[in-house]
Image (spheres, helix red, strand yellow):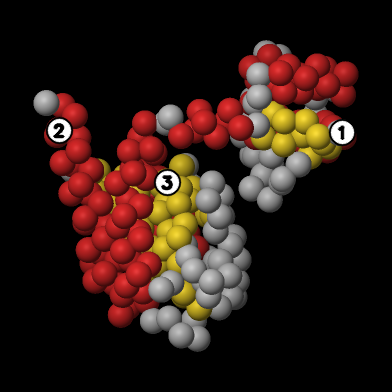
Amino acid sequence: MSDREFDQTTVLGKVMAVLHAFTIDDATLPLAELARRTSIPKGTLHRILSDMAAVRLLDRSGTNYRLGGDLFELGMRASVERSLLEVAIPFMEDLYVRTHETVHLGVLDGTEVVYLSKIGGHRQATAPSRIGGRMPVHCTAIGKVLLAHGDNTLREKVLSGSLPRHTPRTVVLPGPLRTQLDRIATEGVGYEYEESAAGIVCVAAPVREGDDVVAAISVTGPSHRFRPDTHAASVRAAAEGIGVTLARRNRLLVK
């Protein structure tokens, strides 16, 4: 369930509250659960849900609701993410062929990583990441890379706030995390060692568009067989390739 708050005195606010009531793990939700998560009275909520289903923002199956197909179509029209995905996917596929481990592409949203794409085979590691899902920046390689190259205001907000422990190895003290971020900013690559989930290790590098870091790419594998440092050069090369291609595409679009 989303932590965002919406002005539910407006119809749009109620619609947004409904949409954000769905989490990455929810295939469907019944009316009663939507009412609980949104705090919208059931009578009002039923009318909102009917209107949303009529325009395919939601699909209804009996007494359950799920996010509608039109949301996917609208999401794929988001120009920045679509352009990034179109450019990144071939590089992600090459990285998967090279490593045979799970490849992620993520962007920063507040103090969280949003995963835009994930490529993995039959033996991929059991990671908590999902396409469209979120993870805190402090416990993932992608998150730490994005934070290390983000603005100082965001970095200090994260370092001065709560750093929840996801595993016994999660870095929850600001000092050690700050040291990691400084090293990432210098070396251009970041690591995670079982910090978001037990048995998972990861290496990530920033995707730059000009002077701005717009995303990060990573390779994740199980700790018993995957050595992140041996793939750092490949991940960095893929990230640089995505950035160069983005810059070239943008120059062509401007002309």
Q: Nearer the viewer, residue 34 or 159?
A: 34
Relative horizontal placement of residue 140, taking residue 245 as reference (left or right): right
Question: Which label's residue is closer to the chain start, 2 or 3?
Answer: 3
On the image, the x and y values in percent for residue 222 come to 50, 78
Query: For residue 44, which quarter of the picture?
Result: top right
If the image is split into quadrants, where does the C terminus sit? top left
Instruction: Tell me the amino acid under the disc marked 2.
Output: Leu
**Residue visible at 38% across and 81% down?**
227
- Residue 101: percent from left, percent from top: 43, 72
| 242 displayed left or right of 169 | left
Q: Nearer the viewer, residue 32 or 3?
A: 32
| Residue on which disc 2 sits | 252
Q: Secondary structure at mark 2?
A: helix
Task: State whether residue 75 is above or below residue 217.
Answer: above
Return the mark for residue 108: 3
**Residue 242 in the image, given as x and y percentages of width and height:** 25, 51
Q: Do labels 1 and 2 touch, CB within 8 Å? A: no
Residue at the spot x=88%, y=18% of the render?
Answer: 43
Q: Quadrant of residue 228?
A: bottom left
Q: Element type at marker 1?
A: loop
Mark closest to the chain's N terminus, 1 or 2: 1
Q: Which mark is residue 63?
A: 1
For the residue pair 41 and 72, the one nearer the viewer reads as 72
Residue 49 seen by the camera: yes
